[in-house]
């Protein structure tokens, strides 16, 4: 007997309300009391026939729910697998980073050992030089003594001879004996006579002018003889010592050739200019400097010690070319400067990686919004700001960009600063530009204060920052080190006051002072060409007081201060030591890093400027090289090097320098960027003419284009591109260089054929009867013949037929006849592999790896 079902069970099964079932049964005169009433099989079938659609929906829903459950389980498994792979990849990256750190540590130790070796060699050379000086001094003393003894002997012999002539009554035997004794004078007797002669000389000082003149004549003759004798002796010593050193070098097989090439260079020339002087690739100098522990860029200026050291590595001898007026403009600290020195504000440079909050921190301190005015939200210039802190204290801040393209600008900031604030984001930790900033600060020898920013973020990890800093030699005080640190949030202002207190504490320890009552001296931090104001430079004063109307010399330019502005554009009358100011009155745009010196007379300033410009033109004339047949031959031997010539115009000298460094860093052995010209100011007609003559494109950075230049560019077909963010310029030039690269040719297999039978055709020779096992073969395909995985032939397809008809292609699963061009040694069982050659675009990274 079938089991009866209750109304609520059927409703649950069909996923409908039991009220609907009760209404249905009531309309069909089926007597039921409530949803708990059982029904027989017949009534159940009636209900199913009425509500069958709902049952199908219910079954479908249940199946869909089961499917979703299975899908969620699969996704969860995939997610776990992905997390496992990520963890493995993370562990691999950590291992690679550890190995890289170990390699860098070994390299650093090797550099230190090399430096110690050089110091030892220098000390040995100095020791040898001192020994030679001592030998020369002794030789000179011995020669003088010998000549004095000879002179005394001759004088004594003459006196004895005169006495002998007076005593005519003496026997000839005694005269002969006296002559014999004068010829056999001993050295000890000569020394005694010299001492007695000196005593007599002191007694004879009062005997009159006649005797004095006689002695002076004799003395002058003796001095001349001594000098001649000393010269001969020293010449012999030099000859012997040179022969001795040569023999020693031959024995050690370390003979060094004297540099046959001499170059003239002035201090603070750039790496690019030095490379042109020596006619070598600038990248070789950068590599050599990196090996010696110096981080330089192609446009970075070098001091004379570095120039001499680098030139010596390449076998060149440097003849220093003094800059005109250097002795007049040299900064010498006098006793008056020390007595009148007063405390000055500290110059603090904010350094760190991009987007770690450097400018945001300055915004909070200055209560300004500088970030909103920066293109792309990144700082692209060096900004100088003077900020007043409590108790009438002032701090001068330098904000340097954090992007890797602004290496030279950050280095310049470290060289003119007193304290470096290294800002690190707590949610991002130590990044490449953070390490670079640490190296620049250490090279400049300035104290470092660590600012750990963004501590208000939930993913912030302060201890991780301290741990990674310790791996780069920065151990904070909390971990027992010497570097002060502050935790802060530049967005909310939390911890900023503590950072300012640490800066003032470092300033008090340094005891920064300068004499304000003298002619001003400073350095150009940034320069630009303003459309309404003309050449403008941000100058940081080191010493003295700068006032409106002062005459000055800055690099190769001269001028008179027409106006002074602060960072907000307000007029100011004077600028004290340690304060920045925008100076108006230059005759042209100076270079960032030029020394700014105030002179009392305008005529003297203009004279120095004119002579320096003349000297600069002579240097540029020496650097300019004509393309000779030998140069063309050398380029042909080196291979095809394609160049992309560019003319760069920007609003500031530092930005142009950064762009030029970034673009020239894209060069490889196959393609290169040639910076034809770079300058500050809007794009003019002369720039277009230069670009047209050199087949170059013009890159404008934060500048406009003159209307006449636009029309001329259209006529000359010169491309002008303007940018606001440096990333865009670098990326587009990178794509353009990749377009100049020769594409890579690759083989793409299109089909494989099995040779089953060989036919001898009178005109065509041997024809292979084949079966296409995969892909297809075309009439234009190239073909390889493989026998036991050995390649026997690689060439063209001569004939392709289906039965007696020539065809263009044969697809998989069909038979065909194939004749190969110039190959008849084909056998059944061979495999014919059809392929085509495709061109694949290459990237600069692939070109660099290949070179």
Image: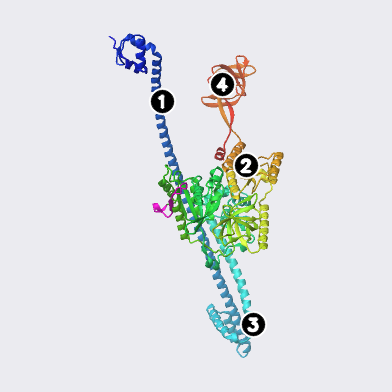
The mark nearer the N terminus, 4 or 3, is 3
- From the image, tell me which residue sits under label 2: 722
The mark nearer the N terminus, 2 or 4, is 2
Please identify, in this view, whether the residue under mark 2 or under mark 3 is nearer the observer.
2
Residue 486: say if magenta.
yes
Q: Which mark is residue 469?
A: none
Q: Which quarter of the picture shows residue 610?
A: bottom right
For the residues bearing labels 1 and 2, Cβ distance under 8 angstroms: no
- How far is mark 3 from mark 1, CA to CA? 123 Å
Q: Residues within 10 Å of mark 3 (few under 14, many from 20)?
A: few
The answer to whether one can see residue 695 in this image is: yes
Q: Nearer the viewer, residue 461 or 689?
A: 461
- From the image, tell me which residue sits under label 4: 776
Q: Which residues are magenta?
A: 476-494
- From the image, tell me which residue sits under label 3: 213
Q: Nearer the viewer, residue 16 or 190?
A: 16
Please identify, in this view, whether the residue under mark 4 or under mark 1 is nearer the observer.
1
For label 2, the SS is strand
Asked if 449 appears above or below 741 in the picture, the reply is below
For label 1, the SS is helix
The answer to whether one can see residue 114 in this image is: no
The mark nearer the N terminus, 1 or 2, is 1
For the residues bearing labels 2 and 3, Cβ distance under 8 angstroms: no
State the scheme by which the image is colored. Answer: rainbow
Asked if 669 appears above or below 410 in the picture, the reply is above
- How far is mark 1 from mark 2, CA to CA? 52 Å
- From the image, tell me which residue sits under label 1: 71
User: Measured from the top left, where is residue 148 in percent x and y?
Assistant: 58, 77
């Amino acid at each position: 007997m079938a089991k009866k079902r209750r109304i609520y069970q059927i409703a649950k099964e069909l996923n409908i309300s039991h009220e609907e079932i009760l209404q249905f049964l009531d309309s069909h005169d089926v007597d039921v009391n409530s949803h708990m009433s059982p029904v027989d099989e017949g009534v159940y079938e009636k209900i199913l026939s009425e509500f069958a659609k709902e049952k199908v929906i219910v079954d479908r829903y249940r199946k869909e729910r089961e499917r979703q459950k299975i899908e969620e389980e699969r996704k969860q498994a995939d997610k776990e697998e992905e997390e496992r792979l990520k963890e493995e990849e993370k562990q691999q990256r950590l291992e690679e980073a550890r190995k890289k750190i170990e390699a860098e540590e070994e390299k650093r130790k090797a550099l230190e050992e090399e430096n110690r070796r050089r110091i030892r060699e220098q000390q040995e050379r100095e020791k040898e030089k001192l020994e030679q000086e001592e030998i020369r001094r002794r030789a000179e003393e011995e020669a003088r003594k010998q000549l004095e003894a000879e002179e005394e002997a001759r004088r004594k012999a003459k006196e004895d001879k005169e006495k002998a002539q007076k005593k005519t009554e003496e026997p000839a035997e005694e005269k002969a004996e006296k002559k014999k004794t004068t010829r056999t004078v001993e050295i000890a007797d000569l020394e005694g006579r010299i001492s007695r002669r000196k005593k007599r000389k002191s007694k004879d000082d009062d005997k009159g002018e006649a005797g004095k003149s006689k002695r002076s004549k004799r003395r002058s003759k003796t001095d001349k003889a001594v000098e001649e004798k000393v010269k001969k002796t020293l010449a012999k010593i030099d000859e012997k010592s040179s022969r001795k050193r040569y023999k020693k070098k031959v024995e050690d097989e370390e003979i060094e050739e004297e540099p046959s090439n001499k170059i003239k260079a002035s201090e603070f020339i750039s790496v690019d200019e030095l490379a042109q002087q020596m006619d070598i690739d600038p990248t070789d100098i950068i590599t050599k400097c990196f090996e010696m522990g110096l981080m330089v860029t192609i446009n970075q200026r070098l001091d004379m010690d570095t120039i001499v050291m680098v030139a010596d590595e390449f076998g060149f001898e440097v003849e220093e070319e003094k800059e005109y007026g250097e002795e007049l403009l040299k900064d010498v600290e006098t006793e008056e400067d020390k007595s009148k020195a007063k405390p000055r504000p500290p110059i603090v440079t904010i350094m760190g990686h991009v987007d770690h909050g450097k400018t945001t921190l300055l915004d909070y301190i200055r209560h300004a919004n500088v970030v909103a005015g920066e293109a792309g939200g990144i700082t692209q210039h060096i900004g100088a700001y003077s900020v007043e802190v409590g108790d009438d204290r002032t701090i001068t801040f330098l904000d340097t960009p954090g992007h890797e393209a602004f290496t030279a600008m950050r280095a310049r900031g470290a060289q003119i600063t007193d304290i470096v604030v290294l800002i690190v984001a707590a949610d991002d930790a130590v990044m490449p530009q953070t390490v670079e900033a640490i190296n620049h600060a250490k090279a400049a020898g300035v104290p470092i204060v660590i600012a750990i920013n963004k501590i208000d973020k939930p993913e912030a990890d302060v201890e991780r920052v301290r741990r990674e800093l310790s791996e780069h030699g920065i151990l904070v005080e909390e971990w027992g080190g010497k570097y002060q640190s502050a935790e802060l949030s530049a967005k909310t202002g939390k911890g900023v006051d503590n950072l300012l207190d640490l800066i003032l504490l470092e300033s008090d320890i340094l005891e920064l002072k300068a004499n304000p009552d003298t002619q001003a001296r400073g350095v150009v931090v940034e320069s630009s060409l303003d459309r309404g104001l003309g050449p403008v430079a941000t100058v940081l004063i080191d010493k003295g007081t700068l006032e409106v109307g002062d005459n000055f010399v800055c690099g190769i330019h001269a001028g008179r201060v027409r106006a002074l502005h602060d960072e907000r554009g307000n007029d100011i009358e004077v600028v004290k030591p340690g304060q920045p100011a925008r100076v108006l009155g230059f005759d042209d745009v100076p270079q960032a890093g030029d020394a700014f010196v105030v002179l009392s007379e305008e005529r003297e300033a203009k004279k120095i400027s004119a002579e320096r410009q003349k000297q600069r033109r002579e240097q540029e004339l020496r650097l300019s090289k004509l393309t000779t047949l030998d140069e063309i031959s050398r380029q042909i031997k080196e291979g095809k090097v394609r160049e992309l010539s560019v003319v760069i115009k920007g609003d500031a000298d530092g930005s142009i320098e950064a762009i030029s460094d970034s673009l020239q860093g894209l060069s490889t052995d196959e393609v290169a960027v040639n910076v034809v010209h770079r300058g500050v100011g809007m794009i003019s007609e002369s720039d277009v003419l230069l670009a047209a003559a050199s087949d170059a494109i013009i890159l404008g950075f934060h500048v406009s284009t003159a209307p006449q230049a636009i029309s001329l560019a259209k006529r000359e077909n010169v491309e002008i591109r303007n940018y606001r963010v440096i990333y865009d310029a670098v990326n587009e030039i990178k794509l353009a260089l990749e377009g100049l690269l020769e594409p890579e040719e690759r083989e793409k297999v299109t089909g494989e054929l099995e040779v089953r039978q060989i036919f001898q055709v009178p005109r065509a020779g041997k024809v292979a009867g084949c079966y296409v096992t995969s892909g297809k073969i075309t009439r234009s395909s190239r073909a390889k013949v493989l026998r036991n995985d050995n390649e026997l032939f690689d060439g063209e397809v001569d004939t392709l037929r289906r039965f007696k008809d020539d065809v263009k292609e044969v697809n998989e699963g069909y038979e065909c006849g194939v004749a190969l061009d110039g190959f008849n040694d084909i056998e059944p069982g061979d495999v014919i592999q059809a392929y085509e050659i495709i061109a694949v675009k290459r990237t600069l990274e692939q070109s660099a790896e290949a070179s």
